[in-house]
Amino acid sequence: MKSRIINLLKVVISLSLIAYLLYRYWDEIIHFVTTVTTDDIHFPFLFLSAFLHVTGLIISAVRWKALLKLQGVNPTINHLNGSLLIGIFLNNFLPSSIGGDTYRAYDAAKMKNSSWPKSITVILVERGTGVIGLFCFVLLALFLGFRLIDFYTILVVMIVLFVLLSVFFILLLNPKMLKPFRFLFKIRFMQKMKNKLKSMVNAFSALGNKKVLALVIFLSFLMEFNVILHYYLVALALKIDISFIAFLFMVPIVLLVAMIPISIGGIGVRENTTTYFLVAFGVAASQAAIFPLLVLLQLLLVSIVGGIIFLIRRPKIEKIQKEAP
């Protein structure tokens, strides 16, 4: 019951934020839609930006496959791509207790030589390396933003993020360093953090192949860069005249903010944050509002493909929920 209420609130927040964006820039959006011509859109860049969803899937599938192979599991890239698409669909269209990661863990657990512990370990490592890649790009983004935001504000944020990232790496390499701080984990909130960190540490330790982990971290960086490039190509398609450096600054922060678990798949939060930055960069309000909606449309179309694959495979959500540990 509690999870249903939380999911409902997330849906309401996502819809409300999208409605707010439309309301605030309605006149500009209508003007753009009614006056836009084929000369106003560079279609090759638009198609290329859509194609980057494919490259993103391939990168994610290769990363997932490399981790599964360490566990003695060897699925095909095509099968993993299908599971990733289903995960995107579940995250964006089915706000329930089963999310994309839960389905992917379930799907991997059914594979030959696999199990729930193995598949969950892989998902944890994959998510962990993804967070590492994103945090590094956020640090780069803040460094690039010195001229846009108050110097001392950015410096403080960079120091905090750097310390957190350093502590994260140190604890992964030597979790025994947590022992002097055991008293802190008696607090309920800290206990939850400890359990999550412990799960992450155990997951990294269970794999133990530094070469593969290095490859996975590299692929995580490549994945983040792929998203930045996707945003930049959408901007080129709309003939938005700002530099690639601006997107190196903007996109990592947008992705980080979108991770705040208050909406469905970051929908609403991501679009409003993107519009805010584009307007701050001097982009016309009409283009600034249309841009994130176009990015969202592409994502929803990808999600629909995942929904079709979900129907073809016909997995039962009740069974997934029941079997999930």
Image (cartoon, helix red, strand yellow):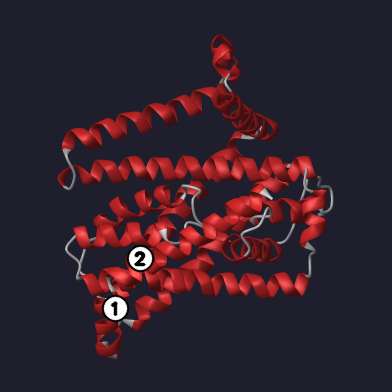
Choose between 221 and 191: the one closer to the eye.
Answer: 191
Asked if the residue at tag 2 contacts the one at tag 1, i.e. Cβ–Cβ closer than 8 Å, the answer is no
Residue 18 sits in quarter? bottom left
Which residue is tagged 2?
20
Nearest to viewer (mark 1 / mark 2): 2
Residue shown at 43% from the left, 63% from the top: 16
Residue shown at 80% from the left, 59% from the top: 318
Could you say which disc has been placed on residue 75 in the image? none
Residue 72 sits in quarter? top right
Instruction: Determine whether, in the image, residue 118 is placed left or right of residue 211.
Output: right
Residue shown at 62% from the left, 29% from the top: 201
**Residue 290 position within the rendered picture, expressed as x and y whole percent measured from the top left:** 32, 73
Which residue is tagged 1?
29
For marks 1 and 2, the one nearer the N-term is 2
The answer to whether residue 167 is above or below residue 183 is below
| Residue 264 makes an appearance in the image | no
Instruction: Determine whether, in the image, residue 301 is placed left or right of residue 314.
Output: left
Choose between 232 and 68: the one closer to the eye.
Answer: 232
Q: Residue furthest top?
A: 180
Residue type at tag 2: Tyr
Instruction: Determine whether, in the image, residue 207 is placed left or right of residue 135.
Output: right
Residue shown at 66% from the left, 34% from the top: 203
Choose between 107 and 36: the one closer to the eye.
Answer: 36
Residue type at tag 1: Ile
Element type at mark 1: helix
**Residue 75 position within the rendered picture, expressed as x and y whole percent measured from the top left:** 74, 57
Quadrant holding the C terminus: top right
Q: Residues within 10 Å of mark 2 (few under 14, many from 20)?
A: some
**Residue 56 position within the rendered picture, expressed as x and y whole percent measured from the top left:** 51, 61
Q: How many marks?
A: 2
Q: Residues within 10 Å of mark 1 (few under 14, many from 20)?
A: some
